[in-house]
Image (cartoon, helix red, strand yellow):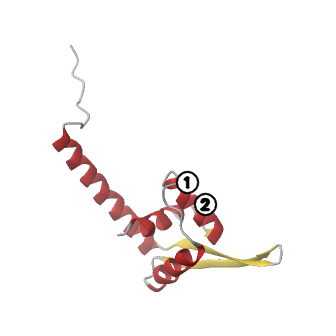
Amino acid sequence: MREPTFLILTALAEGPRHGYGILQEVAELSGGRVRLLTGTLYTALDRLTAEGMVTLDREAVVDGRLRRYFRLTEAGRAAVTAETARLRDLATAAERRLGTARRSVRPA
């Protein structure tokens, strides 16, 4: 799974968000490193909707502008959960090889 996809799905893990909210959450999750363009986000949301990972939750007009709210589906939740486990396993393997894995403290 590509990082932007992972971040979009993660941004939706706590509940439905509109496009701008997703953009903000992705930036926050990545520490400002990933900043998606609006067109890129909606292209990804269209793809993720077609793949059954997200769905349109509702639409609302706010200040005269249409906001579309998206939510994670069960398939999307399963995908981000699996990717999280995969990334954790990779990080653990890297830490072991680098000798930086936390070692358990043994009582004296």
**Mark 2 sits on what residue?**
24
Q: Is residue 18 visible?
A: no
Q: Position of residue 5 (x, y in %)?
A: 44, 70
SS at circle 2: helix
Residue shown at 63% from the left, 64% from the top: 21
Is 24 positioned to the left or the right of 86 in the image?
right
Residue at the right extreme of this rendering: 63
Q: Quadrant of the C terminus?
A: top left
Spot occupied by residue 75 in the image (x, y as percentages of width and height)? 42, 74
Q: Which mark is residue 87?
A: none
Task: Locate residue 57, reporting x and y percent.
Answer: 62, 76
Q: Reply above or below: 46 against 98.
A: below
**Residue at point 44%, 72% (across, down):** 76
Image: 16 above or below 105: below
- Which residue is more in the foreground, 65 or 37? 37
Report the residue that reaches farthest toward the top.
108
Q: Amino acid at mark 1?
A: Glu
Q: State yes or no: discs 2 and 1 in contact (Cβ < 8 Å).
A: yes
Residue at screen point 19% across, 41% down = 98
Label drawn at residue 28: 1
- Horizontal side of residue 63 vs 12, given as left or right: right
Label 1 sits on a secondary structure element that is helix
Residue 20 against residue 65 in the figure, above or below: above
Q: Amino acid at mark 2?
A: Gln
Query: Which corner quadrant of the image does residue 23 belong to?
Result: bottom right
Which quadrant holds residue 99?
Answer: top left
